[in-house]
Image: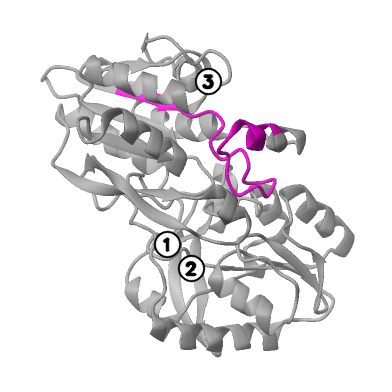
Amino acid sequence: MGAHMGRVSEKAQLKLGLIINPVAGIGGKVGLKGSDGQDTIARAKELGACQESGIKAGKALAEFADLAAGFALYTCAGAMGQEECEKLRIPAEMIGGGGGESSAGDTTRAAKEMARLGVELLLFAGGDGTARDVMDAVGRTVPVLGVPTGCKIHSAVYAINPKFAGAAVRKMIEDGKVPRLREAEVMDIDEDLFREGVVNARLYGYMNVPDDRQRMQNLKSGRSMSEQASVEMLSNCVADSMERDALYIIGSGSTMMKVKEKLRIDGTLLGIDLVYNGETVCKDATEKEILDALEEYGKAKIIVTVIGGQGYIFGRGNQQISAAVLSRVGKENILVAMSKDKADSMFMQNLYIDTSDEEVNRDLCGYYRVLVGYDNYVMYKAVCE
């Protein structure tokens, strides 16, 4: 049950819809950079990937489970909603479908049916692909709120993390109404190109989301020309300060790619690379390969950047650096680096951490010295809820 006790408005019950894409994010830890398509899902399972989307969706539901008297919930059978509702003893009406392996068609059919039933807010868990499917079904006719569980989340229809999504819904239930809405972007990412290191993001459309700037994430931002010089300086600093006889787990993104270029190693733009004494020991590593390398090399450090516009250092685009990896390496061996331009744009904002392990999240929270230039640091606070 939820950890809160709150008052519910005496107004009529809020009608909510819930759709969980159970395979969202399944390719993250095994380095597939997405989960679109049955071939990708099958490959992820072959590599030992586990479905974690439902677990993350459950974190959102737990935030308002104790207010069941204040809402009526419609959801899908099985892993698309029913299972998580039953775990939290949330009463829900099944609308059919979703009992076995889910598909984009299941999502769109469920969303259309929920719109027909007159839900006042559609809560859905997934990534950019799930957002596109929901948009195809309801457009801007139904307010939506995304629970982030996918590998790539460039769209602005998602809350910052699952708990924030649940907290936003909780406030609506307590108020007895959906708040003022705003339009938010749904982005379309070409996964095949993404796996080749090319980010081809285009605007797919808009959906209406709660105007809750504290809990909703921003659209992922790009890079300005002035940022290039700043990245050059911090990448020089990282390369110059790397220690001997330590395994370096270097994250994804263009800033980290610049570091890899400075080291003159064979690295990947959107993957995780492992470096030891100036040599690449594993390119585009999976979670298992990182854990195996930690067993072999012992001493290790992690270098990551901040996702522009969103503030994430773990849990977005680098799921291979999992809770298990982070707990082995430790907060004291993590270096966060971002350009001065990006740091200026995030002035007075928090960094975010969203692994699948709440205890690890809490251990990693706190202050970080973030490298923003050559031997130039700024303090930032990282939070997980």
Q: Main secondary structure of the magenta part?
A: loop
Amino acid carrying label 1: it is Gly
In the rendered picture of this protein, how many numbered marks are placed on residues? 3
Instruction: Indicate the secondary structure of the residue bearing disc 3.
Output: helix
Q: Where is residue 319 in the image (x, y as percent from the top left)?
A: 61, 50
Q: Which residue is drawn at 66% across and 52% down?
A: 320
| Closest to the observer, 50 or 155 | 155
Helix, strand or loop under label 2 = strand
Residue 4 appears in view: no
User: What's the image's color scheme?
Assistant: one colour
Of callouts 3 and 1, which one flags the residue occurring earlier in the amino acid sequence?
Answer: 3
Which residue is tagged 3?
Answer: 79
Left-right relation of 339 to 286: left
Q: Mark 1 points at which residue?
A: 311
Chain part drawn in magenta: 17-42
Residue occupying the point 57% across, 55% down: 193
